[in-house]
Amino acid sequence: MKKIYVFASMMLAVALNYSCAKMDSPAFPSQDTPTEEAEGTKYLINVGGETHEVMLIGTFNAEKGAKVDFYLEGDANDYYGIEIDGAMTATGTGEKVFAEGKTTTGIIKVYGNKGLTHLTVTNAYPTETTFKNEWMATLETLQFTNPFSKTIVLPETMTKLKNLFISDSEITTIDVSKFTTLESLSISSCKNFASIDVTNNKNLTDLRLVGDIQLKSKLKSIDVSKNTKLKTLFVNDNEIEKLDVTALTELTQLRANGNKLTEIDITKNTKLKKELSLDHNKFTIATLPTMPAEIEQYNYAPQADMEVAKSFKVGETIDLTAQLYAQGVAKNQATTEFKFYADGKQLENGVDYEKTEDAGLVYKFLKKNTKVVCKMTTEAFPDFKDENIFKTTEFDIVAAE
């Protein structure tokens, strides 16, 4: 099995001048690339004002442009390829400048590797990325990290692709509909990522569409109804409001924290034994699911504050009946305890508010107060405590008209 790692830490970039200065060095073996006298020569490559030491294992063509593969110091199997449109000129000082003074297009070039199965491209900087290679048909794993690429075009010849990993990219979407052999798909930390169609990828067992905890992705929905082989589903730190996982009967791990979910049905996910993460959403005590039997990890706290009216008049009521009972992680149904606070000070039952005679749990406000919240605790969800306590949004109690 051949693995090629293409590291572009020296910033392969559009609209930058690339320059090389020759250094004396022993030759390194080529990677089945064409050989010339310059093969194995060590160079300093300068991109964006930064200098990096590399090993040339490709060829020069001063008239038709430059096709250069660089060996990076480190693992002898790691090398970096650049193909630059534009002539390469000599400066007369031993330094060669690629397309000096003009905008160029940088293309990561991998060639001469029959049977290539794994390709990793990290920190590459073209704004548009198209993978074109005659050996891509044998590729099984592609991992790509590029903080500037707004589009990624994958060749349909990758009929054996099983694993695709994309991270730190500017893409908003990607077409994976032709890659029906995919088993693992991961798109992470792509802040502009907004949509994807995986309904044709029915062999997926691992799907990860993950935003960043600091800067969420823009994904608002995902249809996984056709991905019935899924065992792992990570869709955390996005903007998802609804998630239907009822078709995922093989699911063992679900991570949907950091979204805008208000409810989820997991009654059909009987194999969900490894993890269920639903924290940092908009669930309430009433809508959080009961902990699945024998699950190793259930994360539910904290949740966003439960939204209520911004103000109530003296004599008006608030109905919290729906939050009164829940089972959650407890063996049996538990009763919720409710406490009201104004500006951090606990209010008194019978003085500031009172429970009405209505059925359920309805409180009537008796006097004016500002910045009031109701905090709720229950054995059903014991992690709702301290800074993670479940509570309402702030509201004021104003005078009756």
Image (spheres, rainbow, N blue to C red):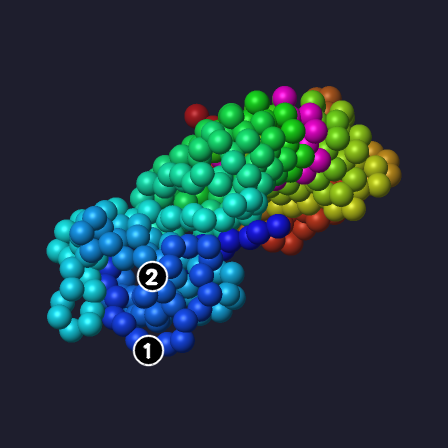
The Cα–Cα distance between marks 2 and 1, rounded to whole angstroms, is: 16 Å
Does the segment drawn in magenta span residue 233?
yes
Q: In this view, does 164 lie to the left or right of 270?
A: left
User: Which residue is painted at 70% across and 29% down in the image?
Assistant: 229
* Mark closer to the observer (2, 1): 2
Is residue 310 visible in the rendered structure shown here?
A: no
Q: Which of marks 2 and 1 is nearer the N terminus?
A: 1
Task: For mark 2, give the secondary structure.
Answer: loop
The spot of residue 264 in percent (x, y) is: 66, 28
Q: Which amino acid does label 1 sit on?
A: Asp
> Which numbered dot is residue 36?
2
- Position of residue 192 relative to residue 42, above or below, is above
Q: How crowded is mark 2: few (under 14 residues within 10 Å), some or many (20 or more)?
A: few
Is residue 272 visible in the rendered structure shown here?
A: yes
State the residue in front, 368 or 289: 289
The spot of residue 240 in percent (x, y) is: 52, 32
Does the segment drawn in magenta span residue 349?
no
Q: Name the residue under label 1.
A: 24
- Position of residue 384 relative to residue 30, above or below, is above
User: Which residue is painted at 50% across and 65% down in the image?
Assistant: 76
Range drawn in magenta: 226-240
The spot of residue 156 in percent (x, y) is: 47, 29
- Main SS, magenta residues: loop
Q: Which amino acid does label 2 sit on?
A: Glu
User: Which residue is painted at 58% across and 41% down in the image?
Assistant: 140
- Position of residue 229 relative to residue 42, above or below, is above
Q: In this view, does 121 lie to the left or right of 151?
A: right
The spot of residue 311 in percent (x, y) is: 48, 32
